Image (cartoon, helix red, strand yellow):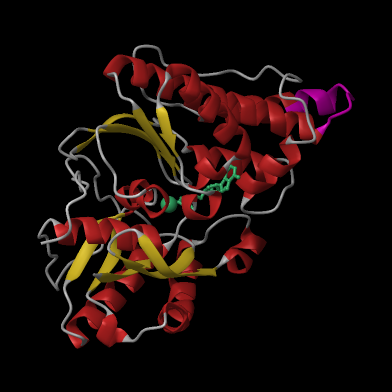
Amino acid sequence: MLVLGIETSCDETAVALVEDGVRVRSNVIGSQVEHHRPYGGVVPEIAARAHLELLLPALDRALVEGGCTYADVDAVAVTTGPGLVGALLVGVAAAKSLALAHSLPLIGVNHLEGHVCAVQLEFGLLRPPLLALIVSGGHTSLVLVDETGRMSTIGATIDDAAGEAFDKVARFLGLPYPGGPEIDRLAREGSADAIRFPRALLDGTYDFSLSGLKTAVVRELRRREAAGEEIHLADVAASFQEAVVDVAVRKTMAAVARHGVEQVTMVGGVAANSRLRERMAASCAEAGARLLMPSPALCTDNGAMIAAAGWNRLAGGERTAYDAVADPNLPLAGLVVRASGEPPS
Ligand code: KG4
Ligand code: ZN
C-alpha cells in the first residue's frame, strides 16, 4: 500500500511516498529556512505563504522521485495538528483536494505521532510497549506506548520546548536560525564543564522546565560582559547543551526504570543533537534498554513519518472524513500506533 504523506505544520514543506509504512520511495523537503532566517525564527504568516508556494512543486517531485503517478497512490496522509494553524491549513486543504480528486482515502495524522513513527522507517514496524522522548521545536514530552499501542503522555514541558530553548539561546549567542544545529556544531569546540548551568529536575514528575536555564545563560553572559571577562561562546554552547541533555536523559531513564520498559525511542528535531544521541545511547545501554532513534534526517520534520503514521492507522481500518479540519492544539493522548506487524487488512 503506497501512502502519500504531507507535512506542513511548521517551516518544512514536506511530501513523501512510503510503501507499507516502512519503505521510503521518496522524501522531499522544501526548506523555508531562507524565508525565516532574516527574522531569527519562524514567522507564521510567512510559513503559510511559503507552503503555498512550495507545496505543489514538492508534490510533483515526490511523485517523480518515487517513480509513480497518482494512479499508484493508495491513500493520502496529512498532518492535521498540532502546529501553526495557517501552515497546517495549506497541507490539509491540499490533501483533501487530492484525496477527493483521485477518490483516495484521507488520513489525518498527529504531528507528534508522526515523529514517533519515523522510527519504523529504519527499524521496522513498532512493537510496543515503549517509551518515547519527543523533543522538537514545539514539544518536549515523554510518552508511554502500552502493548496495545495506546499512547499516554507522562511528562511534558511546562514552559519552553527543547528546540525552542536551543533556538532562543542560539539567537542570544548571535548564531543564525535554526539555532539547534548551530549550537550542536559549536559545542563540539567547547567544554561542557566550563559553566555549571542549572538543571530543573522537577522531582517527582516527568515534566520539563527549560526557561530558567535559558535565563541563566543570558544572565551569565551579561555578568561576564559587565565584569569584562572573556566569553568563549563554544563553552557557553557546550555547557548549555549539556544541561538540556542531562535533564532529558535523567528524566527518560527515570521513566524507563519506573515503568520497566525495554525499548526507548527518541524522536523530533532535537533528537538529531549529537551529544543527546551519544548520552542517551550510553544510558540506555547501561540500563539494558534498546534505543531506537531515527537518523538525524528523519528526526526533523518530514513527510515520510506522516505517511508511516498514516499507514498504521489505515491498516487499522481508520479513515478521516473529507471535511477534516486543522487543529493547532490537537492532543496526542489516547492515540494509537500500530502495535503489531500483521499486513494491513
Ligand atoms: O521536529 P522539528 O523539525 O520541528 C518541530 O516539530 O518543531 O524540530 C525543529 C527543532 C528546532 O528547534 C531546531 O533548532 C532543533 O529541532 N534541532 C536541533 C538540532 N537539529 C534540529 N537541536 C539541537 N541539535 C540539533 N542537532
Ligand atoms: Zn516536528
Quadrant where the C terminus lies?
Answer: bottom left
- Is 96 placed left or right of 119 in the picture? left
Residue at the location (23% across, 70% down)?
1
* Residue sitting at x 47%, y 47%: 294
* Residue 138 vertical position relative to residue 311 in the rendered view, above or below: above
| 315 up-or-down from 130: above or below | below
Q: Position of residue 76 (x, y in %)?
A: 25, 72
Q: Nearer the viewer, residue 307 or 6?
A: 307
**Which sits in the foreground, 277 or 222?**
277
Q: Is residue 177 left or right of residue 131?
A: right
Report which quarter residue 185 is drawn in: top right
In-front residue for pair 196/335: 335
Picture quadrant where residue 225 is located:
top right
Report the residue at 19% width, 70% height from top: 106
Q: Position of residue 94 (x, y in %)?
A: 30, 78
Q: Is 271 colored magenta in this rendering?
A: no
Residue 174 percent across, percent down from the top left: 74, 46
* Image vertical order of residue 327 relative to residue 16, above or below: above
User: Which picture quadrant has residue 37?
Assistant: bottom right
- Position in image of residue 119 (x %, y %): 39, 47
Report if residue 8 is visible in the image.
Answer: no
Residue at x-position 49% and y-position 18%: 286
Numbered range of the magenta stretch: 221-232
Whether residue 95 can be seen here = yes
Which residue is the extreme one toward the front? 342
**Magenta-colored stretch includes residue 223:** yes
